[in-house]
Image (cartoon, rainbow, N blue to C red):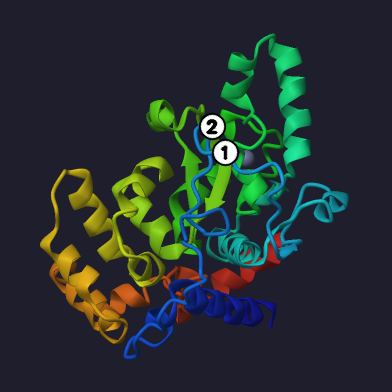
């Protein structure tokens, strides 16, 4: 029953997240309201926050809720908050980890106010002796994604501190490989250190929405690189495009090319946008993909492609669930 409710909620998140195009592919996306701010700004899922792009001291996200997910201590649960849509996606991810693999994930740190980040940073400076050294491990106030209410630090039962070793646990590996299906990206990797300015943090996940998370995962690039190029795309594309189109466009832009299809997308009137997205995607599909496959690839979430959902594996699922409850 619980799973059905989660499935329903996740289906709803997916539809809302990808816009009308995703929910009803035949229909056109609603024209953007004049007052709607960009998905790249601080309230948007693609807001870029780092030392060069700081959030205002007074920014507090709306709709903070407690995600209904496991934590290492029950008392921790009421101290962990996220924006509501990110919380629902996190719940889907935790549920899938358990259903598909029997892995329990713990949430450990979500929304952090500016003042709290300042205290954490100052104590790190005292510990290591300089601001420069401290900022390799703790984000200076205003440069932490946790202030957005879209980031969550994860733990595994076998690994209860935040360290690189989380990335070597089964749970950590699973999260790194699957988070994009739920709209999350593994935000900091060693290979990206020169771009992000942050050491490897296999525990830190950031919500950006399923299409963007999957595009970044496919391209294996950090949010900084993605946003730098995605900025060139029209707002309705950022809000309504599927991951194949987004990855294809960003890949071209990264190579310094101007994809001709971008001109068509820019020219499309509001009532032509859904069709423009479809036409732009078709040449990017692989031979075994249909447009509908791409639209619904992670739908519903947790996606029912994992073995536990098929008939022959039903018994195995029961066992897995039984062991972990
Ligand atoms: Zn974090």
Q: Which residue lies under the disc numbered 1?
A: 54
Q: Is residue 115 left or right of residue 1?
A: right
Q: Residue drawn 58% across and 78% down?
A: 7
Judging from the image, what secondary structure is the residue with disc 2 in? loop
Mark 1 and mark 2: span between their CA atoms? Answer: 6 Å
Q: Is residue 53 left or right of residue 234?
A: right
Q: Residue drawn 49% across and 72% down?
A: 17
Quarter of the image where ligand 1 sits:
top right
Q: Is residue 164 left or right of residue 283?
A: right
* Percent coordinates x, y for residue 25 in the rendering: 34, 86
Q: Report the disc number at residue 51.
A: 2
* Percent coordinates x, y for residue 101 in the rendering: 54, 58
Q: Are marks 1 and 2 in contact (CB under 8 Å)?
A: yes
User: 266 or 168: nearer the eye?
Assistant: 266
Q: Say if residue 136 shows up in the picture.
A: yes
* Percent coordinates x, y for residue 320 in the rendering: 62, 64
């Amino acid at each position: 029953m619980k799973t059905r409710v989660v499935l329903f909620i996740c289906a709803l998140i997916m539809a809302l997240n990808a816009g009308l195009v995703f929910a009803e592919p035949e229909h056109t996306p609603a024209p953007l309201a004049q007052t709607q701010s960009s998905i790249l700004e601080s309230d948007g899922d693609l807001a870029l926050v780092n030392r060069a792009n700081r959030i205002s001291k007074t920014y507090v996200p709306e709709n903070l809720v407690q995600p209904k997910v496991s934590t290492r201590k029950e008392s921790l649960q009421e101290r962990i908050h996220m924006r509501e849509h990110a919380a629902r996606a996190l719940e889907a991810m935790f549920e899938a980890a358990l259903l598909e693999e029997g892995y329990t994930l713990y949430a450990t740190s979500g929304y952090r106010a500016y003042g709290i980040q300042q205290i954490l940073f100052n104590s790190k400076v005292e510990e290591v002796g300089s601001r420069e050294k401290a900022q390799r491990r703790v984000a200076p106030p205003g440069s932490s994604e946790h202030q957005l209410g879209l980031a969550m630090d994860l733990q595994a039962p076998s690994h209860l501190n935040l360290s690189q070793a989380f990335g070597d646990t089964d749970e950590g590996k699973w999260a790194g490989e699957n988070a994009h299906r739920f709209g999350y990206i593994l935000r900091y990797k060693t290979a990206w250190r020169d771009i992000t300015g942050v050491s490897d943090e296999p525990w830190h996940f950031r919500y950006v929405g399923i299409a963007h998370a999957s595009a970044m995962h496919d391209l294996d690039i950090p949010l900084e690189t993605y946003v730098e190029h995605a900025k060139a795309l029209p707002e309705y594309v950022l809000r309504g495009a599927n991951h194949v189109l987004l990855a294809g466009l960003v890949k071209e832009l990264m190579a310094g090319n101007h994809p001709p299809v971008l001109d068509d997308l820019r020219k499309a009137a509001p009532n032509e946008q859904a069709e423009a997205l479809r036409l732009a995607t078709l040449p990017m599909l692989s031979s075994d993909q249909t447009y509908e496959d791409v639209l619904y690839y992670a739908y519903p979430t947790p996606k029912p492609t994992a073995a536990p959902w098929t008939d022959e594996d039903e018994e195995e699922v029961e066992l897995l669930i039984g062991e972990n409850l």
